[in-house]
Amino acid sequence: MVWIHPVLQFVATLIGLYAMYFGWIRFQASHMGRKVVFPWKPHVKWGTVALGVWAAGSLLGLAVARLAWSSMFITGAHAWVGLLMVPLCAVGYFTGQRMDVVKKRRKLLPLVHGVNNLLLVLLALWQLWTGIGVVRIYLL
């Protein structure tokens, strides 16, 4: 049961990187003058999946830690950063939903969305790194 959290979060991070690749295409078109076709629907689909699994996986990680070790924050910064990711996932989801539902030219909302989600990907990669340490200490 303890392995469900790291496996879910690893898969979510791969999906998040995939969605970020599509976001990078959009960034190139918007800010670098490149003529590219933005794969909007796959970006929305995979970005939504990544955000949902990251948020659910973060909360699941706290629950698993509580059940397995009787302490939700035994993993220190790993747990706190995971908890920080939950509201960032909400920001990413709601800004993305707004842009998907109400399509128009914008400047600020895509910037907030992109910076927020880039931060999420970086935090997820950091979580992967610290999570390896958690696995070594507590699961192996």
Image: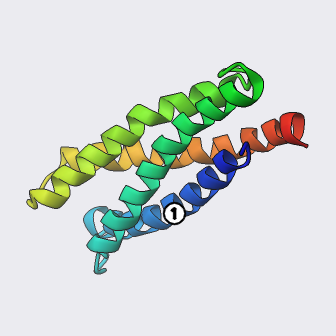
* Residue under numbered circle 1: 15
Q: Amino acid at mark 1?
A: Ile
Indicate whether 27 appears above or below 37.
above
User: Seen in the image, is 31 located left or right of residue 64?
Assistant: left
Hey, which quadrant is residue 100 in on the image? bottom left
Between residue 30 and residue 52, name the one nearer to us.
Answer: 52
Q: Residue at x 29, y 42 (%)?
A: 112
Check disc 1 and report its element: helix, strand or loop. helix
Hey, which quadrant is residue 39 in on the image? bottom left
Q: Residues within 10 Å of mark 1 (few under 14, many from 20)?
A: many
User: Seen in the image, is 103 located left or right of residue 44?
Assistant: left
Residue 17's spot in the image, x, y percent? 52, 61
Indicate whether 74 appears above or below 17.
above
Q: Quadrant of the C terminus?
A: top right
Residue 19's spot in the image, x, y percent? 43, 64
Indicate whether 50 appears above or below 54.
below
Q: Residue pushed farthest right?
A: 140
Q: Residue at x 58, y 62 (%)?
A: 14
Residue 32's spot in the image, x, y percent? 33, 66
Q: Residue at x 44, y 35 (%)?
A: 86
Between residue 30 and residue 64, name the one nearer to us.
Answer: 64
Instruction: Specify the color scheme.
Output: rainbow
Between residue 5 and residue 113, name the one nearer to us.
Answer: 5
Between residue 110 and residue 99, name the one nearer to us.
Answer: 99
Residue 123's spot in the image, x, y percent? 57, 41
Q: Quadrant of the N terminus?
A: top right
User: Seen in the image, is 113 located left or right of residue 73?
Assistant: left
Hey, which quadrant is residue 28 in on the image? bottom left
